[in-house]
Image: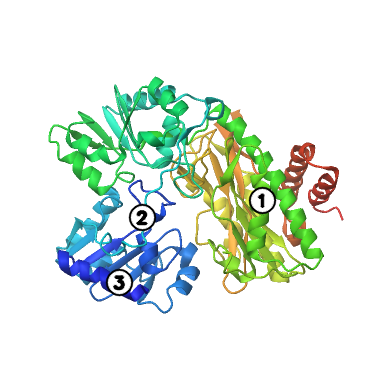
Amino acid sequence: MTVAEKLEALRQQMTQHGADAVILPTSDPHMSEYIPAHWESRRWLSGFTGDAGTLVVTKKESCLWTDGRFFIQADQQLKGTPIRLMRMREPGVPTVGAYLAKAIPGGKVAVDGRIFSELEAENVQKELDTTGAKLISLDLVADVWKEDRPALPETPVYLLEDRYSGCTCADKLAQVRAELKKAGADAQLYSLLDDVAWATNLRAADVDYNPFAIAFLLVTTEKAYLYLDKKRIQASAADYLAKSGVEVRPYNKLEEDLRAGAAAGTVLVSRANTSFDICTCLAENKDRKLVAGGDIITNLKAVKNKTECANMRICHVYDGVALVRFKMELERRMAAGEPLTEWDAAEIAHKYRAQQPDNRGESFETIAAYGPNAAMMHYGPTKEQHSDLQPKSFLLVDSGGQYLTGTTDVTRTFAMGPLTQEEKECFTWVLKCHIDLADAKFPQGTTGHELDALSRVQVWKHGLDYRCGTGHGVGYMGAVHEGPHSFRSAIPLVPGMTITDEPGIYMEGKFGIRTENTLEVVMDEKTEYGQFYAFHPLTMFPIDHTAILPELLSSDEIAYLDRYHATVYQTLAPHLTAEEQAWLKNACRPLCQK
């Protein structure tokens, strides 16, 4: 079926069920960023493959909303379809709710309430209220997408041992219950897959690049219920759960149990992380009191314990070794005149990561983007569609790994040959952004949002900016994008948090540049003005000297870069061969040393 044919079939369902419009978000019942193929209805209907976007279909029009990271990609992929691109947060572009309120006044807007959060539903309904339209929970995709729809995954569920997690499941549940007591609540339901993984110390491979099992967790003051099919759980993990006081229930029994009275008393509800349907189900019991509040587990897991912090440093050593070998092979094959593509580069990086101890795959699809392709922030080559590498301009490689010892995320932009003055200037400006944030010292209570300008000011000076966040939290053998903290968030940064520092410049039709390290928030000095914190770089891999204009860096920025490179060499050298050490020593030489 073509995109137009799929939309027409959907409109037939709308007419049959009395809906005037339908919202199709990029989501699943767990409000995931990366979702199983079974739930990728927005992608299937629209043909847009970006990781974020919302498709809206009325009887007359279809529109897709996405953010600045995907403007170029969406514009290309929607060509030839009836779908109009709505560039989020651009002047004159309405929100989904405002658009629908005007398009179908007094009408009915269908959304699959299993995959739409309560908070999103409330926000959309507020805008629909202005013209009397109403949001209803209705799955209109099931009868359209039938023949080739993938089944829900059922990969084996195993235990992440306590020597990796640093804390038992029983102790984590005790922490959750202590926070419930502080909040005056008797229970909270956890839908986020990384929440469930953290609390239970279980891992699986249900979602590409995310080591999670599709499951819900209900924690009360007395009990814990894991909604996950038992047949999937390895014997040692099942025994561990039983000893931790966790009862396993069938995945599809959650709403039935809630209607039967599970989670009695006062229930703390994170509206952003709980579906519209589940909140409706919870509200059906009049003896149950729902209180809006934060997601307790999300806040707890954001701060890594001592074992996790120590292990994260280890996995970044593994990652650095893999990247050294990747870059050396890439250089060797390019120098020999071998034809190489973006796909080849991604495969080389994958090969060397897979050889590292405790590796469990990649943490996201590798972005290996040459030249103009790198201007698309989330571009990814495929075996069928990719560009050739040439001995000029830039190759941007954004990649990461999942290890039993942690999760990595790193971006480097490599000079593939001669560069223009503009390319070198932009590379150096991005480096200044990166260093000025990475070298920051800040007082206790400082939020990521408050630090964001330390990075952006270096590109603002030149009338430039980047349409994305400067950095995000990183999980532990978990989600590569982890909240609640980021450089857009109002959450204070505290020691034990891990966060990326990844400013960039993206010139459509020319090139893209990004320099990214994962950082750990650490204690710094305490003065009469209070406790100060700083960042410690976890990522161990050199930044390309050949693209830098040293005269554009301050003496402090040069000193930081030289210290960083000295640390990279000292950290990685013991794990490398003599040939690899020689390559790394040259790559980590002081900036002004010829």
The residue lying at 37 percent from left, 74 percent from top is: 2
Count every numbered label the image shows and give the total: 3
Q: Nearer the viewer, residue 490 or 98?
A: 98
Camera-side mark, 3 or 1 = 1
Quadrant assignment for the C terminus: bottom right
The picture places residue 141, in percent across and down from the top left corner, at 28, 61
The picture places residue 563, in percent across and down from the top left corner, at 75, 43
The picture places residue 110, in percent across and down from the top left corner, at 22, 60
- For the residue labelled by badge 3, is the local secondary structure a helix, a strand or a loop? helix
Q: Earlier in the sequence, mark 3 or mark 2?
A: 3
Choose top left, top right, bottom left or bottom right for residue 521.
top right
Q: Amino acid at mark 3?
A: Leu
| Image position of 261 (left or right of 587) | left
Q: Amino acid at mark 2?
A: Trp
Q: Nearer the viewer, residue 193 or 557?
A: 193
**C-alpha gap between disc 3 and disc 1:** 40 Å
The residue lying at 38 percent from left, 58 percent from top is: 40
Residue where numbered disc 2 is placed: 39
Residue where numbered disc 3 is placed: 7
- For the residue labelled by badge 2, is the local secondary structure a helix, a strand or a loop? helix
